[in-house]
Amino acid sequence: MKTKSVKKQKVNIVTLGCSKNIVDSEVLYSQLKANYIDVEHESANDDADIVVINTCGFIDNAKQESVDTILRYIDAKKEGLVSKVYVTGCLSQRYKSDLQKEIPEVDEYFGTMHLPQLLAVLGADYKHELIGERSLTTPKHYAYLKISEGCDRPCSFCAIPIMRGGHLSKPIEELVTETKNLVKSGTKELLLIAQDSTYYGLDIYKERKLADLLKSLSDIDGVDWIRLHYAYPSQFPLEVLDVMRERSNICKYIDMPLQHISDTMLKLMRRGITKNRTQELVDTVREKVPEITFRTTLIAGHPGETEKDFEELLRFVEQNKFERLGVFGYSHEEGTHSYSMQDSITAEEKEERIAQLMELQQDISASINQSKIGKTLKVLFDRKEGDYFIGRTEADSPEVDNEVLVKANHYVRIGDFADIRITHAEEFDLYGEPISL
């Protein structure tokens, strides 16, 4: 075994999975810094003495990535490159006993709600006064704001309640404080996230309070964009759309995972909504906020999905022409209601259905993007890559949506807005030039 050189203790946090995990890692990072512990997030030099892996356990591919990452750092530990490896997050919450048997070299496993215990092992105290404060791992001009934890929905395919527990809203006052702290640090865009943002407030206020939350956040000076993610369609609070239409700093954007449209599949998925009510909701959203960008996600290959059901889904996408759309192949998850059903649709069939949906969406997106040529759009620039500055419009969330590319010989500033005239469009990207003042 190689001998590890003596150096000051340093913690490297590695984050896998969704934006909720990013927020959890940022909270951990902030707590460690407050305890004067040397910490980095996904260290470029990979030179930390201790590694904390924040895992994802959502679907098969994410679980495999988490396991592969754990094994990579276990190999580094065997080679003497790190001394301790700790695992936290959803995979650890869901499969702790299995992981302890299969990968016993990990020093300790922690669940999603075990931050104080993890901090104790790392030699840190949990500082309650830091609630509402965190160190960003995203560019400072945008930040994810987790408005609630867990989920009470009974969706047949989803293991989130197993890993994250029941729904628990954060109080509006706490979220306002957190937002004000973010703004002081330079945040201009808030991305509201939750397992189910539609449910916000029911547990602590006994009524849906998403619209009131949006108003409170919108009132904070310095917040330029507020973007709403993960709105559940069943019992969606329509007053949210009124606030979105009336407030200029609330993006005309909604991320609402619809999952399917066939009545048979919606019932099997236990979505609590029908095809007709889903279509009525989509129509209402577009009617109340005519300029809205509607993002949705779908599942292909759930047990029981027939060719007829899938064709119905294709027609639904073609008819509604969603501005943004993603598709997941069904993943057979232990502990879920669907796990009792036979996963009879082959991986090849699932991939074919995903390909058909995304090919259709590619054409829809290309047509929408072509219509933007010659228009001037407000763009927030995130980064520079190669010969281009890369940014997003009000219609685009980081990582998952379209981007706007501007040649680097033009002047724009990372983290700032600029008015960009669109000169060229591809299926999922726009190209443009800054408007001279």
Image (tube, rainbow, N blue to C red):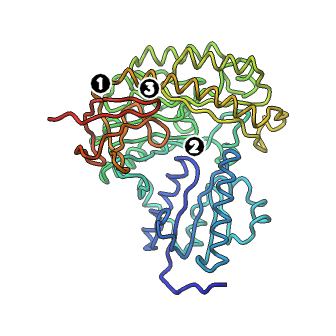
Q: Position of residue 74 (x, y in %)?
A: 67, 70
Task: Tell me whether circle 2 and circle 3 mark residues in contact (CB < 8 Å).
Answer: no
Q: Residues within 10 Å of mark 2 (few under 14, many from 20)?
A: many
Name the quadrant of the N terminus: bottom right
- The reply, left or right, for residue 368 in relation to residue 4 is left
Q: Position of residue 349 (x, y in %)?
A: 75, 31
Q: Quadrant of residue 211?
A: top left
The single residue placed furthest to the left in the displayed view is 437
In the image, is residue 27 above or below residue 398? below
Q: Earlier in the sequence, mark 2 or mark 3?
A: 2
Q: What amino acid is found at the position of numbered circle 1 in the picture?
A: Lys
Q: Please give the residue where the numbered disc 1 appears in the rendered image.
A: 375
Query: Of helix, strand and loop, which one carries label 1?
Result: loop
Which is closer to the viewer, label 3 or label 1? 1
Q: Residues within 10 Å of mark 1 (few under 14, many from 20)?
A: few
Q: Earlier in the sequence, mark 3 or mark 1?
A: 3
* Badge number at residue 293: 3
Which one is nearer the viewer's eye here, 376 or 186? 376
Which one is nearer the viewer's eye here, 233 or 418? 418
Q: Quadrant of residue 223?
A: top left
Q: Position of residue 132 (x, y in %)?
A: 42, 53
Residue at image x 85%, y 34%? Answer: 342
Task: Tell me whether circle 2 and circle 1 mark residues in contact (CB < 8 Å).
Answer: no
Which is closer to the viewer, label 2 or label 3? 3
Residue at image x 69%, y 38%? Answer: 158
Which one is nearer the viewer's eye here, 74 or 274? 74
Q: Earlier in the sequence, mark 2 or mark 1?
A: 2
Residue at image x 69%, y 36%? Answer: 329
Q: Please give the residue where the numbered disc 2 appears in the rendered image.
A: 168
